[in-house]
Amino acid sequence: MVTFLAGGTGTPKLLDGATRVWDPEAIAVVANTGDDVELGGHLVCPDVDTVLFAGGGVLDRETWWGIADDTTETHAELRRLADELGLGAAPRYLDAEAQTSGREIARWRRFSGVGEFMEIGDRDRAVHVTRTSLLDEGRTLTEVVRTLADAFGLDVDLLPMSDDPVATLIHTEAGETIHFQEYWVARRGEPAVADAEFRGADDAEPTAEVLDALAEPIVIGPSNPVTSVGPMLALPGFEAALRETPVVAVSPFVGDEVFSGPAADLMAGVGRDPSTAGVAAAYPFADAFVLDEADPTELPERHVERTDTGMDGADDAERVARACERALAAVRDAPATDPEVAE
């Protein structure tokens, strides 16, 4: 068994190759839910759904969002109505009282559907309606995700990081506190980040299924350390579990150049060096790293495997996955270190 921590697009890309290296039925994927939002009353789980749609063979790989060849008629009509009413398409974050009332899983991440600032396809929306309705029928998020995984024919075991609400909020240098989706989707990474908050994490828990998965060797794909992996690490007991099992991480950087997304700005905003060295510092529990051949970073205290970490297809992803396999094997075969001797 091997467990992948997934957020954003990096780890789903890696999974395209990982299922060639490991038996898919021996793979668990723990997905970030800090990015989730409730939009117009429906729970949208972007990082869960990217794995769901990729595993089901329907992911729109041009945009890494939604279902390929989907229509957007409902979204377009929501935009038209908002324009007719003079309301526009800006994010409409509900007031403080609404954020903590009603459906608990949606706390601190509720947006009005007026104007719908996130583009959602019609088939994609059917998934959100089904998920939300099953939650309202009394199922846990873990149970709902497994039901949807069955519907999409997933071979891997897809697990949300928690059944409790955790919301990733960005504190900006302009003095605002906004949800990550508003920061990234609506405002395109503006204004500058002052800090990141994982609201609710202190009172949330990893599920029993997640804790079981964390007892297996772990691969952290080239995901954003702040908003993709950070919400998981904020859960009580999560990082402690990682310290007890072999962990390999793939850097989303080549030196100080990030492959894609807002990782560099977010890491700088929370006071970490936006680089592979900064990722290593953020993951003190990681035993090994997979770095790009062109990455000049030296990590003398960790095992390092080097390869071309760019992933433009399944063959590339398999190459990176095999580097992860070699790194895990090296960590497993390494002699145990006596902490007193190391000091």
Image: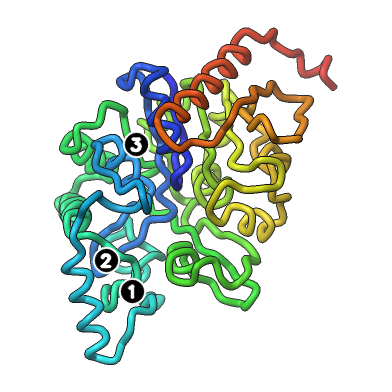
Element assignment for label 1? helix
Q: Amino acid at mark 1?
A: Ala
How far separated are the C-alphas under marks 2 and 1? 8 Å
Say which of 169 and 20 sits in front. Answer: 20
Check disc 3 and report the residue beneath it.
Answer: 159
Image quarter of the C terminus: top right
* Number of the label disc, if any, that sits on residue 102: 2
Say which of 270 and 214 sits in front. Answer: 270
Seen at 22% across and 43% down, the residue is: 144
Residue 291 located left or right of residue 28 = right
Image quarter of the N terminus: top left
Mark 2 neighbour density, 10 Å: few (under 14) some (14–19) many (20 or more): few
Residue 102: name its quadrant.
bottom left
Above or below: residue 301 compared with residue 48: above
How far separated are the C-alphas under marks 3 and 1? 28 Å
Q: Where is residue 74? Give x, y as percent.
A: 17, 69
Seen at 43% across and 39% down, the residue is: 206
Q: Where is residue 76? Give x, y as percent.
A: 22, 73
